[in-house]
Amino acid sequence: MFPKTAMLRAIISGFGLLTCVAHGAAQAEDLSPAEQQIIAAVKGHSDAALQLLERSVNINSGTLNHDGVREVGKLFRAELDGLGFKTSWSEMPAAMNRAGHLLAEREGTQGKRVLMIGHLDTVFEKDSPVRLWDRKGNRVRGQGVNDMKGGDVIMIEALRALHAVGALDNTRIQVIFSGDEESAGHPISISRADLINAAKRSDAALAFEGTALDADGNATGTVGRRASGGFVLTVKAKQGHSATVFGHNGYGAIYETARILNSFREQLIEPDLTFNAGNIIGGTEITYDSLTGKATAFGKTNVIPPSALVHGDLRYLSAEQGKRATERMRDIVSKNLPGTSASISFSENYPPMSPTPGNFALLDIYSKASKDAGLGEIKALPPGERGAGDIQFVAPYVASLDGLGATGRGAHSPDEDLDISSIQKATIRTAIYLYRLTR
Ligand SMILES: [Zn+2]
């Protein structure tokens, strides 16, 4: 998935800067001889890296196109096999309707145990009219170029550069390319089990979703992503003649719903917490179809309505913030107006990636690697500014950093594109970073 406001801002104001800001040249004294060789290896393979990206993008791999997802998996698997990884394909039960994941691992004894996370699928299903690959100069448009086949190629190319100088020997690195990041299979306990198991055996998790730019066009790192979930508010009331409203027949379901939502807005607003009421239905008779999000309502102006229903979205940055918010919402919901009753239920699709000290420590090492390679300091993207992603399933178990991939705009849209030069930059940063983490 893709960063929302930050990426948009970067697109609007930062892109022009990105291509013309000259970063300071790499200071040779900041890099070891091995690191200088690694950078040379990345540069020497840049054209081939772009070809690998083109090959992967030319395979449609919408989440539900299992053959396509497997085909991209096969392509990347061959690359990882060539780099000395032990690879396997993790099948999902047929009922889940997902292609599965590509797993790869190198066993060793030195340095940190690193987990690298990418995904094979895109939001563009087989019948998508969006072109697969359409290069114009230094940019390329296409299905999943940036979200996230660009990031996938960066992962492989960074590992290839380390391999080229013998620096993968004895490292402990796991790679997971999930096949259903854009629409995680249910139950989550099965579709995300491989990620969670790998996280439990790692010291650091790195995800290669697109690098978001700040307002000045500088690359950032993602140390936090908000949990994403929802709420359903159900309100019941006594039906009666409208002339008796506020009297012995009570207030009706619609006034009670209005009280509750307005109380949320008045009492709950705080940084990094949002609760959006997405639809509301009220009246004498209501129906709601959760598959389509379509609803019907019937009611008369002279009848106190007995039913109302609200579906909303809820996002928070830490489990503690989520708990606090849901407790206060339940409390507000319980203080019913006369003649009414209400209940609220909550669901969580993605757990929060809280911006922990461990995540910031990982960012510091990454930023230093980038600076030493002459590619500038990397600051944290404000944690509230990014949508949900796979890193969130591992973040509760291991220090995590996301947003290490390529830079582009318009993810999930027909205009999705990629700045080709960002591949080499991110690959250099990642390669030096991996080298240092695994010494
Ligand atoms: Zn993605």
Image: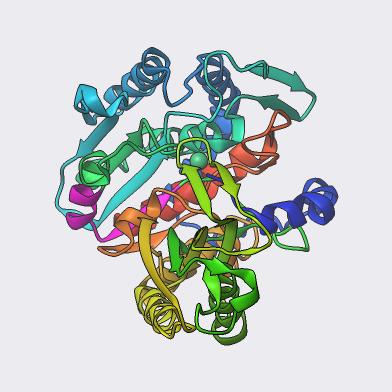
Q: Residue at x 47, y 49 (%)?
A: 430
Q: Residue at x 62, y 36 (%)?
A: 412
Height in image: 334 above or below 148? below
Which is nearer the eye, 338 or 25?
A: 338
Which is nearer the eye, 428 or 303?
A: 303
Q: Position of residue 300 (x, y in %)?
A: 65, 56
Q: Position of residue 23 (x, y in %)?
A: 73, 56
Q: Residue at x 65, y 57 (%)?
A: 219
Q: Which residues are magenta?
A: 196-207
In which quadrant is the C terminus drawn? bottom left
Q: Position of residue 171 (x, y in %)?
A: 23, 47
Q: Is residue 228 visible?
A: no
Q: Is residue 234 left or right of residue 18?
A: left
Q: Position of residue 160 (x, y in %)?
A: 40, 33
The color scheme shown is rainbow
Which is nearer the eye, 225 or 176?
A: 225
Height in image: 413 above or below 400? above
